[in-house]
Each structure stands twice: as structure tokens, then as C-alpha cells.
Image: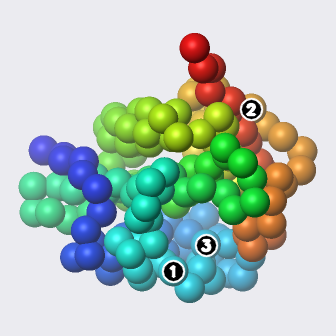
Amino acid sequence: MINIRRIEKKDDVQVEALIRSCLIEYGANHEGTAWCDPTLACFSSLYVGEGNAYWVAVDEKDRVVAGVGIMKLEGKANICELQKMYSYKEIRGSGVASELMNIALAYANEYYDACYIETLENMIEARHFYEKYGFKRIDEAIIDTGHYACDIRYILYFEKE
């Protein structure tokens, strides 16, 4: 049984371990990726304030098995970034990522006009997943996130009534 909830301080170490494990899996454990982000161990204090949130999927033992965040892009009016969407191998294909994505995009749609994401060419499954949700590939970064090794970028514009 998987439960999805907002991140809590007790989750910080587990979220960092999840992200680092996935980055190692894809050979992204180097500079220019989330690997070097100084905030990896303190998401519960980072994703605060209106328009910013991080959700974790936890198993019956309260072990973090997946997560995703929405964060305002500084200097970009009405655009957020889908951040740090990772899951352990054993959870992939279970529908948990879809649940997390639906929650994150519904939240982002409340605050923003568009959602941006950066990823890597070799994260093929992730890229297909983003495209399934309507993210469109763009050629250039819209802002310097510090993740210069991320060679694929997407944006999703929300349809507003």
C-alpha cells in the first residue's frame, strides 16, 4: 500500500538517498546535475511557501519510494519547475509516478501558467512519461538552473479557462 503526502522533515534523508540512487543508476552522479545540489538533504525546509511543494510516496513502513516537487522559477513570471521526480526501480510501472504527476500538475496549475523541466537524454522512460503528460520539448533552457549537464528540456503550458 502506497500513501502520497507532503514531505516532512523525517523524510529528508530518505529523499536524498532516493535521488542519489536514481542518479547513480543513470550515470548522472556528477557535476551539472542534481547530484551536486546543496539542498538535497533539506527538501522539507526548501519546498515551502505558496506555489512550492514536494510530495513523497511512502510504503507501509513509511519508506520513501518516490517523490516529486513543484518550485517557482525565480525571475520567470508564472512559470514553475517540476523538480526531483524520482522513484525506485521496484515502484516503476505501478502507477505511483502517475499519481504523483497528477498531484503535482494540479497544484502547479493553481499557481502558474506553465511548468518547465530539465532531464537527461538517457532517461528515456522519464522523457516518454513527460511527453505523455503533454510536455513539449524545447531547444534552449529558459533559465540557468545550474544543471548544465541536463541536455533535454520540456515545457507544459496550462490551459486556463
Q: How is the image coloured?
A: rainbow
Q: What residue sits right under mark 2 in the picture?
A: 136
| Residue visible at 45% across and 72% down in the picture | 46
Where residue 84 appears, as percent x and y from the top left, is 52, 60
| Residue visible at 10% across and 63% down in the picture | 61
Element on which disc 2 rests: strand
Q: Is residue 100 visible?
A: yes
Q: How many other residues sit within 10 Å of disc 1, few (<14), some (14-19) or many (≥20)? A: some
Q: Amino acid at mark 3?
A: Ala
Which badge, 1 or 2, is on the more N-terminal residue? Answer: 1
Mark 3 touches mark 1? (CB < 8 Å)? no
Q: Is residue 17 visible?
A: no
Element on which disc 3 rests: helix
Q: What mark, if any, has residue 39 been given in the picture? A: 1
Which badge, 3 or 2, is on the more N-terminal residue? Answer: 3
Q: Amino acid at mark 2?
A: Lys
Q: What residue sits right under mark 3 in the picture?
A: 34
Q: Amino acid at mark 1?
A: Thr
Please tell me whether mark 1 or mark 2 is closer to you in this view: 1
**Which image quarter holds the N terminus?**
top left
The relative height of residue 31 versus residue 116 in the rendered view (above or below) is below
| Residue visible at 75% across and 73% down in the picture | 146
Which badge, 3 or 1, is on the more N-terminal residue? Answer: 3
Element on which disc 1 rests: loop
Left or right: 111 as drawn, with respect to 55? right
Where residue 33 appears, as percent x and y from the top left, is 68, 72
CA gap, disc 1 and disc 2: 28 Å
Mark 1 touches mark 2? (CB < 8 Å)? no
Question: Residue lying furthest right in this view?
Answer: 139
CA gap, disc 3 and disc 1: 9 Å
